[in-house]
Image (cartoon, rainbow, N blue to C red):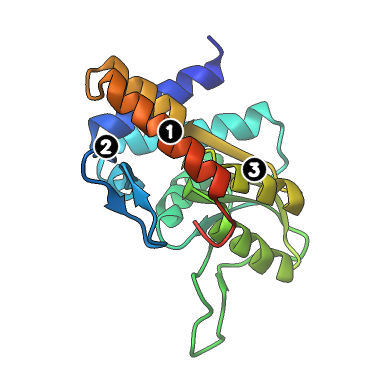
């Protein structure tokens, strides 16, 4: 097993352990988009678990090293990406900034907070990616500031076709620490899901991926 796969499985187990990933095949959750989902991912819970947040920061740092990315600053997305961007920036001893969900309505009306030099090479940190819409909005805001986005990194991805298409069209590589198939396999291994649950989740995922768009994360 590769080191990257070991990290993928470890993060999946940790997210399940702290309750950041919850399955409810019988009573689906409703996403902000209105989509009915048998899985809910709340990576904000990782902030409260030092061991998990250190593993996440170390995982991101390892990807930057393995991929030989040249990075001048780390940028988080509001709000859940901000703390992980800060912890990663601290590990790498790099400047950190963040992208607001919308520009401030007063003062300097900033969309991006923090000091970034023109041409700065940055990595964007997200908590999760579904369709990739909000991530790529952050990329556009940074490009407007003449920053060069070398990659987007996220703790978790649903692995939807729309996201892979959107990132490819934007010319931005996406790296994630764990994903939908890995957390489902980990939950099956620990007895949280039955074979029937797994089949239902896989069918839901195939249908969602086939019909997904790039409206937002």
Indicate which disc, 3 or 2, sits on the residue closer to the N terminus.
2
Circle 3/circle 1 CB separation < 8 Å: no
Relative image position of residue 153 (x, y in whole percent):
56, 43
Secondary structure state at the residue bearing disc 1: helix
Closer to the camera in the image, 211 or 18: 211
The residue where tag 2 is placed is 23
Q: Is residue 26 above or below residue 125?
A: above
Do labels 3 and 2 touch, CB within 8 Å? no
**For this rendering, which residue is in front, 86 or 100?**
100
**Residue 110 spot, x, y in % from top left:** 56, 79
x and y percentages locating residue 217 in the rendered image: 49, 56
The residues bearing labels 3 and 1 have C-alpha atoms spaced at a distance of: 19 Å
In this rendering, the label closer to the viewer, 1 or 2: 1
Q: From this viewpoint, which residue is outermost toward the top?
A: 1
Left or right of 34? Residue 93 is right
| Residue at the (49%, 90%) spot, across then down | 106
Q: Residue at x 72, y 65 (%)?
A: 143
202 horizontally vs 27: left or right: right
Residue 79 can be seen in this image: yes
Could you say which disc has been placed on residue 164 in the image? 3
Residue labelled with disc 1: 203
* CA separation in Å, label 3 and label 2: 24 Å
For this view, does 192 lie left or right of residue 150? left
Residue 13 in view: no
Q: How many marks?
A: 3
Residue projecting furthest to the bottom: 106
Q: How many residues crowd around disc 2 within 10 Å: few (fewer than 14), some, or many (20 or more)?
A: many
How crowded pointer 3 is (Cα within 10 Å; few <14, some 14-19, many 20+) is rated as: some
């Amino acid at each position: 097993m590769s080191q990257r796969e070991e990290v993928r499985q470890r993060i999946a187990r940790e997210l399940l352990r702290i309750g950041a990933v919850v399955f409810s095949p019988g009573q689906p959750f409703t996403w902000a988009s209105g989509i009915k989902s048998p899985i809910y991912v709340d990576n904000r819970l990782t902030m409260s678990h030092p061991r998990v947040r250190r593993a996440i920061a170390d995982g991101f740092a390892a990807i930057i090293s393995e991929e030989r990315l040249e990075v001048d600053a780390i940028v988080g997305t509001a709000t859940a990406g901000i703390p992980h961007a800060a912890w990663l920036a601290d590990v790498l001893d790099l400047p950190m900034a963040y992208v607001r969900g919308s520009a401030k309505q007063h003062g300097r009306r900033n969309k991006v907070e923090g000091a970034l030099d023109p041409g700065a090479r940055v990595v964007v940190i997200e908590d999760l990616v579904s369709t990739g819409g909000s991530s790529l909005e952050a990329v556009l805001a940074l490009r407007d500031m003449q920053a060069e986005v070398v990659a987007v990194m996220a703790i978790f991805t649903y692995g939807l076709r729309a996201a892979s298409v959107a990132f490819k069209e934007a010319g931005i590589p996406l790296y994630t620490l764990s994903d939908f198939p890995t957390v489902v396999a980990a939950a099956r291994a620990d007895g949280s899901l039955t074979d029937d649950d797994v089949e239902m989740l896989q069918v839901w995922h195939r249908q969602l991926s086939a019909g997904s768009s790039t409206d937002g994360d």
